[in-house]
Amino acid sequence: MLQSSELPDCFYPNKPTSISPKWPTPNHTLYLSNLDDQKFLRFSIKYLYLYRKSIPSDTLKSSLSRALAEFYPLAGRLRISRDDEEKLEVDCNGEGAVFAEAFMDFSADEFLEASRRPNRSWRKLLYRVEAQSFLGVPPLVVQVTNLRCGGMILCTAINHCLADGIGTSQFLQAWAHFTTKPSADLAITAVHSRHALRPSYPPKITFPHPEFTKSTPHDTPLDLTQYLLSQPLVPTSITFTPSHILRLKKLCVPSLKCTSFEALASHVWRTWVRTLNLPPALKVKLLFSVNVRKRLRPELPQGYYGNGFVLGCAETTARELVNANVRHGVKLVQEAKGSLTDDYVRSMIDLLEERRTRPDLSASLVISQWSKMGLEDLDFGEGRPLHMGPLASEIYCLFLPVMSDFNAVTVLMSMPESLVSKFEYHMRDFSERDDKEREEKDGCDGNDYI
């Protein structure tokens, strides 16, 4: 197993600066929808980009200032709503984003060597803003770290309450656009208003919402998230080439056609449950992000960069998932996606108005798709990145783009250290042998978890 390399410390020649919008922007309060300010989204999405050649900091600062003129809420500050202490809103005051410059005695090639497995030392690539709470951190924090080889690492932290993955990609592409074409307007205008996702009055909860409902039996007091967080976790990543994904999809034909995401999500979910050796009768869930911009009626306007996704929820027992073909999980994923109609999403928004509830993570795997959102195409004028991914690996699962192959996917997540080898073995095993034969081959006794 490849061991991660610890990064040396960063040297900061100057204190971080504040980058404000290039010109005066509207000074008002921005309403956040119930999809925006969910409690489980109160964190920053942290991206890391590695480039072979650096861009002058003054150029990046100037273009960032221009981009913030278009996406001015990112230059504001989050605060508790004056009308509802359970909700957040954005004070669009133009206070600015944090921009830090650093140098690291490290090369791009050295970073690439260890890029499959993030580790805690990567956190030094993003300037830490000292704040007493989540609300005290500016919505946008940037660090540009120049490397001894002339390369550059760009890290950004974008508050998830203001934008989802598609929205953050839209903003970052705007920043890159103004770096290479300072005087050219954006092809797509940013849409700030979130009123299209206002709840009904009174709220109308017309569907059950299993993504928020705890389904663990009372006689099995199991909280898998707490268990995982109590273990020494290490990142593991496996890249699936187009041929690998095609082999997975062929396990579903001719009776079922599926997308690459559906096949891979089913395989990862099944492998995760098998590796943890969960109680057979335990209800397990797969929660996965689904873009609903075009599922709503009317559709959300082009340029809407707020949270336009919800969590699809597939559910079954551990026994059914592990014993069945990958086709079983695919069907559940497809059914979960199919249920996300306009009425369903509106019902979810109303549920969040009535109860500030969180997703049920007690026995759930969460998958977030970062591939095929344009994140990997971020070019500031010196070419596409050599690497793109998260600043750190978490217990939830990321589907990441592969720089050299648009149709390949890297699966990244953290697992208990004692189970990494077993997880990686099953992830690479696409056959459909029976469980007994599998266990005999990998030497597992089936008692790793319970």
Image (tube, rainbow, N blue to C red):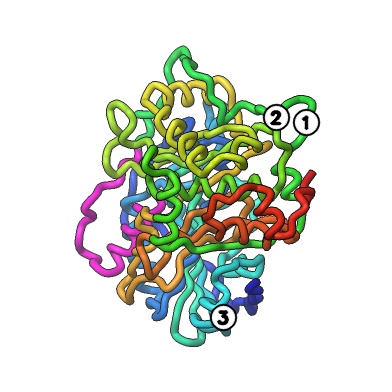
Residue located at (41% from left, 50% from top)? 250
Q: Give, as a three-letter code, the residue at label 3.
A: Met
First in residue order: circle 1 vs circle 3: 3
Q: Which residue is mark 1?
A: 220
Q: Nearer the viewer, residue 351 or 289?
A: 289
Location of residue 49 with respect to 423 vertically, above or below: below
Location of residue 417 with respect to 83 vertically, above or below: below
Q: Give, as a three-letter code, the residue at label 1.
A: Thr
User: Is 122 left or right of 381, judged from the image as shown?
Assistant: right
Question: The C terminus appears in which quarter of the rendering?
Answer: top right
Neighbor class of circle 2 (other Cα within 10 Å; few <14, some 14-19, many 20+) is: some
Q: Considering the numbered disc 3 on the image, is that residue within a helix, a strand or a loop?
A: strand
Q: CA distance from mark 1 to mark 2?
A: 7 Å
In the rendered image, residue 170 lying in the magenta stretch gets the answer yes
Residue located at (28% from left, 27% from top)? 298
Percent across and percent down for residue 267 are: 53, 49
Farthest bottom residue in view: 149
Farthest top residue in view: 202
In the rendered image, residue 31 lying in the magenta stretch gets the answer no
Q: Nearer the viewer, mark 2 or mark 3?
A: 2
Let me know if residue 98 appears in the view. Answer: no
Residue located at (70% from left, 36% from top)? 280
Label at residue 104: 3
User: Is 168 left or right of 77, judged from the image as shown?
Assistant: left
Q: Which residues are magenta?
A: 168-192
Neighbor class of circle 3 (other Cα within 10 Å; few <14, some 14-19, many 20+) is: some
User: Is 368 left or right of 136, judged from the image as shown?
Assistant: left
Q: Which residue is mark 2?
A: 216
State yes or no: discs 1 and 3 in contact (Cβ < 8 Å).
no
Q: Give, as a three-letter code, the residue at label 2.
A: Thr
Q: Quadrant of residue 12?
A: bottom right
